[in-house]
Image (cartoon, rainbow, N blue to C red):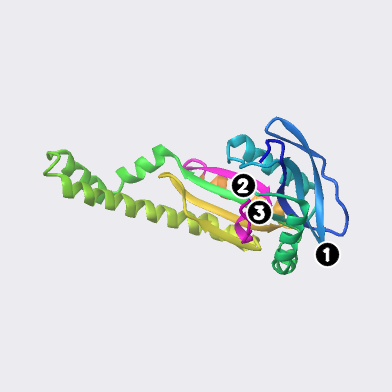
Amino acid sequence: MSQEETGIYIFCAIQTNEDDQFGSIEMEGEKRETFTIRYKDSAMVAAEVPMKIYHPKKDNLLMHQGAVSLVMDKKDTVIPISFGNVFQSKEDVKALLENLYPQFEKLFPAIKGKVELGLKVIGKKEWLEEMVKDNPEVEKMSTAVKGKSESAGYYDRIKLGGMAQKLFASLQNEIKQEVFTPLEETAEAAKANDPLGEKMLLNASFLIDRDKEELFDEKVNEAHEKWKDKVDFNYSGPWPAYNFVNIRLKVEES
């Protein structure tokens, strides 16, 4: 296999009847022109790249997201494709498109004019510590553990860990009711994903109609205003519907 062999890298699928242009992207230091490969009213946005495995390093992931953002600026129906899919030829991509088209036919109307917004809510260290301190059961057990040797306090420590976990779960539940539920009302769909890290209280994705994006932003700001002394908000997007689209790509082994 020669070093110069090229492949076709795919970024996302769109609904279109045109040969759309989205300009060029920079991939591992090289400028690459994007183009579309079409089937019926669907197309893959792709670029010609060296045929190899692309690792999900930060620069590569940002490049992938950047290319999809370029498409989102011009198109209102964008189906995201996961990072790192390279095919041997345009024909292979066209065959994939034909394969996926029955899924796309259902997805296009479901995500037309919609975007995904992400919200992570992270508890501030001082507030979380205060909540633990103000919990009489945890405080009592914590004092009991301090006075004992490592081996003698072993079960107490397990119990203390369990209590702290229970307290944290109740805070997560409170944030879900106070922040997630009101936002869910404005969304077309919403998902509470598993929180990442020990201070995260909410890791949510929302599918929003572009027309309601401003209203949704206002609701996020209202919630932030109410909770800003206790938590940090990490609000991101708009993205294509990564958390609401389940495309099974069958990439053939080369």
Callout 3 environment at 10 Å: few (<14), some (14 to 19), or many (20+)?
Answer: many
Which segment did they paint magenta? 228-254
> Could you say whether the residue bearing mark 2 is in a helix, strand or loop?
helix
Residue 136 in view (yes/no): no
> Could you say whether the residue bearing mark 3 is in a helix, strand or loop?
strand
Q: Are marks 2 and 3 in contact (CB under 8 Å)?
A: no
Q: Which of the two labelled residues, at mark 3 and mark 1, occupies the earlier sequence position? A: 1
In percent of width and height, residue 107 lies at: 71, 65
Q: CA distance from mark 3 to mark 1?
A: 26 Å
Q: Is residue 51 above or below residue 253?
A: above
User: What's the mark number on residue 115?
Assistant: none
Callout 2 environment at 10 Å: few (<14), some (14 to 19), or many (20+)?
Answer: some
Callout 1 environment at 10 Å: few (<14), some (14 to 19), or many (20+)?
Answer: few
Q: Say which quadrant the N terminus sits in.
A: top right
Q: Are marks 3 and 1 in contact (CB under 8 Å)?
A: no
Tag 3: amino acid:
Glu
Residue under the image location 83 percent in, 64 percent down: 40
Tag 2: amino acid:
Asn
Residue under the image location 66 percent in, 47 percent down: 237
Q: Which residue is mark 1?
A: 40
Residues 3 and 27: in front is: 3
In percent of width and height, residue 55 lies at: 58, 40
Q: Quadrant of residue 52?
A: top right
User: What's the mark number on residue 116?
Assistant: 3
In this view, the mark in front (3 or 1): 1
Q: Which residue is mark 2?
A: 221
In percent of width and height, residue 60 lies at: 63, 38
In this view, the mark in front (2 or 1): 1
Let me know if residue 38 is in the magenta part: no
Q: CA distance from mark 2 to mark 1?
A: 42 Å
Tag 1: amino acid:
Lys
Q: Which of the two labelled residues, at mark 2 and mark 1, occupies the earlier sequence position? A: 1
